[in-house]
Amino acid sequence: MDQVETAPQSRAVTFAVLGLASMTIMANATVASSLPGLSEHFTDIPHIDTLAGLIVTLPSLAIVLSAGVMGVLIDRWDRQKLLLLTAALYAIGGTSGLWAESLWGMLAGRLALGLGVAGTMNLGMTWASDLWQGPARARFLGMQGAAISAAGIVFMLLGGLLASYHWRGAFAVYALILPISALAYLALGPHARRIAAERDRPRPAQSTADRFPWSAYAFIAPLAFLFQAAFYITPTRLPFHLEALGVTSPLVVGALMAALVTVSAPVSLMYGRIRSRLSAMTIFGLSFVLIGLGLVCHALASDWHGVLAGSLIAGLGMGISMPNYTTWFMARVPASMRGRASGLLTTAFFLGQFASPLVSAPLVAWFGLAGTFAVIGTTLVMLGVGLWIAQGLRPEPTALEA
């Protein structure tokens, strides 16, 4: 089955796929501004600081456990039914912080949210790979990265604003999945029916070209894991670092973290041009260096100005990094396996997110919050330089292969 589309997509289709992607960034970081208030509300619970971090990253565990299954379902089941199911899980689980009375009820809701994200994120990634090809795919994925960044700005600021009224307020932002999924259901329906019809037609046995590229996944998955594990100390630890620096307003905390994605949006829009001039490995290396330098700035900050500088620098690395993973990997995946490829790449991303507070906890105990940012930031810079040296700055002949 070759799900190749060459005609330009309608605005409704484009906005629908961009909308599904934008919902991903809400999964975890949107409620980061609520963590200090949540910790104070449940202060009698042992290890509440670590458990509060799990409020941010627990959806990642559900995503890790279900993303592979969701990917297979995308390849084999009705995508429209899967969209409705996962959007419902997203809405119910995401808003659970508004109505769940116990911390354990909230944690259960975060697991349901993760199941929803696993479906919507994989659907968005697969649709992007199905409906755009070659250089158009690189440009669209850059646009998608910009949309994620723009959504991050809106969602984190909105979450911070609502959390300033009450710490539960940020959880209301998750209800935005309802209009987005409605648009996706209507706009993508004809494409979903076409793909289902193609899937049901008899076809020859899979050729060698249809084998899953496990060697490519063995390379990209550890990089994706490390990227997310390091990057997600920002939403899980930065609010507490800012509190130690005297910054206690949830709205200000949300604004400082939104600054990170503010700069990533225009960089993502330029991804197609950047990718045509630099190799994928160079972009990976550069992104690790920039994110690492941003974390080092957090470590050295004496007030919010230093944190802002670190967020801006790290945002540059995020902007060029996210579209690079999908572009590099999907160029090596057969059309009939893009769903499971999306699921496996999603698993690597969110395994890193889930592991982040667990990995950083002993580092915080040993080095403190500032020391943790310094250690992880320095490690990322060294990793980025290593990738840079290994690959060099020459363009790849297959930079934009379909």
Image: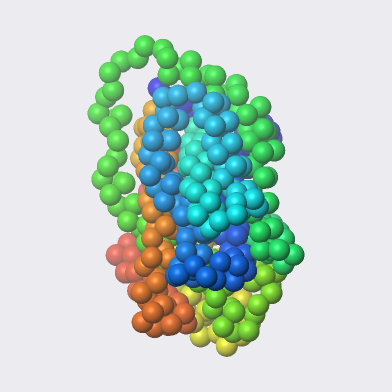
Q: Percent from the top left, x then y, of residue 79?
A: 51, 27
Foreground pick, 217 / 391: 217
Tell me, yes or no, if residue 297 can be seen here.
yes
In the rendered view, how is the structure colored? rainbow
Q: In which quadrant of the rendered view does residue 66 lie? A: top left
Tell me the residue at 56%/59% (across/down).
29
Q: Identify which residue, 245 or 323, lies in the foreground.
A: 245
Q: In this orientation, which residue lies closer to the viewer: 97 or 310?
A: 97
Q: Is residue 135 visible?
A: no
Count of marks, rendered view: 0
Question: In the current view of this chain or complex, which residue is farthest to the top?
Answer: 202
Q: Quadrant of the C terminus?
A: top left
Describe residue 402's horizontal placement relative to residue 110 as left or right.
left
Q: Position of residue 242 (x, y in %)?
A: 58, 78
254 to 130, vertically: above or below: below
Question: What residue is drawn where x is 56% and y is 83%?
Answer: 244
Q: The N terminus appears in which quarter of the rendering?
A: top left
Residue 92, x across and y down, in percent: 60, 42
* For residue 276, above or below residue 72: below
Q: Which residue is outermost to the bottom? A: 302
Rendered location of residue 127, percent (x, y) = 52, 34
Q: Residue at x 49, y 67 (%)?
A: 45
Which residue is farthest front?
44
Residue 146 appears left or right of 365:
right
Residue beneath the point at 30% across and 29% down: 210
